[in-house]
Image (cartoon, coloured by chain):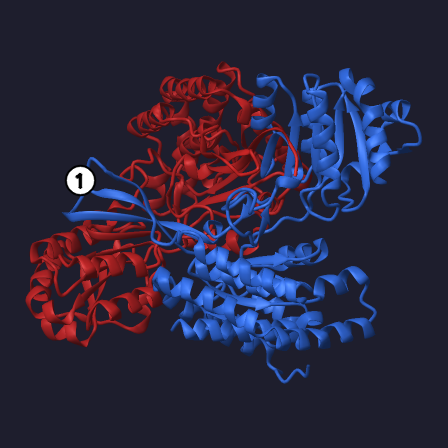
Chain colours: A red, B blue
Amino acid sequence: MTDSITDVKAYMQQLGQKAREASREIAAADTNAKNAALLAIASELENSKPALMAENRKDLDAGRANGLDAALLDRLELTEARIDGMANGLRQIAAQPDPVGEITDMAYRPSGLQIGKMRVPLGVIGIIYESRPNVTADAAALCLKAGNATILRGGSEAAYSNRAVAACIQKGIASAGLPGDVVQVVETTDRAAVGELITMSEYVDVIVPRGGKGLIARISAEARVPVIKHLDGICHVYIDDDADDTKAIEVAVNSKTYRYGICGAMETLLVAESVAARLLPVLGDRFAEKGVELRGCGKTRALIDGVVAATEEDWDTEYLAPVLSVRVVSGLSEAIAHIEKHGSHHTDSIITENLGTARRFMREVDSSSVMVNAATCFADGFEYGLGAEIGISTDKLHVRGPVGVEGLTTQKFIVLGEGTTR
Amino acid sequence: MTDSITDVKAYMQQLGQKAREASREIAAADTNAKNAALLAIASELENSKPALMAENRKDLDAGRANGLDAALLDRLELTEARIDGMANGLRQIAAQPDPVGEITDMAYRPSGLQIGKMRVPLGVIGIIYESRPNVTADAAALCLKAGNATILRGGSEAAYSNRAVAACIQKGIASAGLPGDVVQVVETTDRAAVGELITMSEYVDVIVPRGGKGLIARISAEARVPVIKHLDGICHVYIDDDADDTKAIEVAVNSKTYRYGICGAMETLLVAESVAARLLPVLGDRFAEKGVELRGCGKTRALIDGVVAATEEDWDTEYLAPVLSVRVVSGLSEAIAHIEKHGSHHTDSIITENLGTARRFMREVDSSSVMVNAATCFADGFEYGLGAEIGISTDKLHVRGPVGVEGLTTQKFIVLGEGTTR
């Protein structure tokens, strides 16, 4: 792909300006028009499979030539099944309720004014992502449903694929009579474009980075526009004194082994001292069967053979791999203290039958999802009933946990009077 | 006041660390303890009037010696009535419902999990403010009710007063058995302390600046911690073709003249061409009576004698004074375009009897408060039923409009299962 854009700053400013204008139109668009666009994009994608896969092959060939590793090449690939998956995702988003314009908490005040809140789009959302071309359609669709304009910046390794997906999006939007600038793709692979996108706060309201921790950390450090993100998913399961044995074992195994690479995978298992001797040997066998390497504290190593000694660093590590750190704690307070010190405020679960213990864990663990007797791998917008998700936020402000369409909106006050004065 | 703190960075880090620890305790504190602390602080303030006023006099004397202007000296002064006002504010906050722990949207999912949201404190809030010592008590009280720890940094011109108010707060907190570090006051007037406070994101979750635009702009530019703020209150009233004459005139006059110095004061009046000839002469007389200087477009000047010509700059100016810019527009679309271009997304009002017009204005004007037939000066947390407010946000993320106790909290997902696995 040749890069004909030389003045990146001017180019990005122009993109931003067009996005801001388009955001006003899409904010005022009715639900039918937005849904029609989503369904038209889905059909375009399905009808363009050969073209999408041909463009994708150019990225795959270049990737192989550049020595991309197998995992990255896998994420980059657009198969028929993945294109169908994108189309189905779009149809699901179309079927969801439209949050824009929802009015809540409307009440009369002593002044006679009637005051409430109206849900409205955020405005312009910048999405910065790596490798997976299906993010182009997912992210654009979620933003569009929420009434936002989107500027998409994919990785250079997926440039041909992203452009082909974007062409389908453009056709779908046009067929629904919406302005094409609602979804724009950054057409340069120059890294300076990212620097512009994350600092032009007059045109961009929020940045959603999707990719590895390195990408997200860099963007967060340099952004002047708010960023919705999570850096790490260091998730814990704490097996309490009052845990049910079967639940403890099944949830611990599932939390680690459902899928190793997801941010909701358990990375550290905490076990109350009173149940450790009974449960850890069983868990040791189960994890050994699955090929999970254990790294444990002294007490864990005394109960399970062949466990590597965990270092301080292990407690702070998101393995995203068949590796698990295991620590025996004195009880609830030490478990909470460990999670607060070493966790990433993503998702943490307690296994207990004791209501008081569960209530204290729910209140005191400061994570975006706090679970009781449930596997951490459930941390997912679809499982939570949000439809699709644009990511998971561990930020405290605005939106926390899986972020769906509603997380891409905000609220304003509306105030109705009859010529009311103070 | 002598300044014995030499290593400002280490001092602020220590303050932050203590605040983070205290935030865990106050997050878990029950409602009764928090309310008891608020009521005890109120009594302390009332019982300490002579001491508070004596300390305040030191600031006032220094202020006069340093040539502070009359408006600033007025804001700095603590009178008996103002101390009573602080105490009453605290009692009102104590009487409000406690948002912490509220669980909403709890529903079963197909997996069998029960998933909802729990409202929780933000954590540690840094308040940076100028001159008004009563902010010390207001801000600390709102943060405490929401279960947060607070670090307060007042202006050096109010250092003695702030310290005296803080002593009352400390006594009240201690008497309720809560940790004293829940509210800490920065004990150095070194400006570097602000730089530390707004960048130590490991200890501070959000910054709320209260003061002039200069202070807020500086903090926003340098902060690495999220900031809840507004910069300008360039509020508009638009008198539509279908306005009721009396409502139009009364709301316009009240929006400007209720109080000139508040952020909700109208700064620009927009009038539909079709009603300008009928209404502008009447409005000209009313504003003349009140001593409000008008700056108008050509059409306005043709209808009211002695109106200065408005420059382009006037449309972008928050006067906070008896000055008003007036523009005749062709109708609703031009009014909305003017507000989007020149407004500050604070508070804008339309005067109309036409439902369709009102609905379009409400949807398309992207401001924190959008009003219909109501005076912009109502933009206020107390009037909105939030109890007290810590400020008004024109940010899009997290919280928008007047910010009360709920705006100082966030939500996390809670997920309940029965050993549920995927």
Amino acid at dot 1: Gly
Task: Tell me residue B71's x, y (percent).
Answer: 78, 59
Any part of residue B339 in sight: yes
Q: Residue B264 sits in which quadrant?
A: top right
| Image point (79%, 46%), residue name | B321
State the residue in front, B249 or B4.
Answer: B249
Task: Tell me residue A149's x, y (percent).
Answer: 54, 31
In the displayed structure image, the side of residue A73 where residue A356 appears, left or right:
left
Task: Tell me residue B13's x, y (percent).
Answer: 51, 74
State the residue in front, A364 or A348.
Answer: A364
Any part of residue B122 in sight: no
Considering only vertical position in the picture, is A98 above or below A135?
above
Q: Residue B214 sits in which quadrant?
A: bottom right
Q: Residue A16 sits in which quadrant?
A: top right
The quadrant of the picture occupied by the N terminus of chain B is bottom right
Which residue is disc 1 drawn over? B112
Considering only vertical position in the picture, is B213 above or below B298?
below
Considering only vertical position in the picture, is A99 above or below A393?
above
Q: Chain of mark 1?
A: B
In the displayed structure image, the side of residue B283 where residue A159 appears, left or right:
left
State the residue in front, B363 or A378.
Answer: B363
In the displayed structure image, the side of residue A135 where residue A194 appears, left or right:
right
| Image point (52%, 21%), residue name | A29
| Image point (69%, 43%), residue name | B233
Q: Secondary structure at mark 1?
A: loop
Task: Tell me residue A259's x, y (percent).
Answer: 23, 47
Q: Give the number of marks.
A: 1
The quadrant of the picture occupied by the C terminus of chain B is top left
10 Å crowding of disc 1: few (<14), some (14-19), many (20+): some
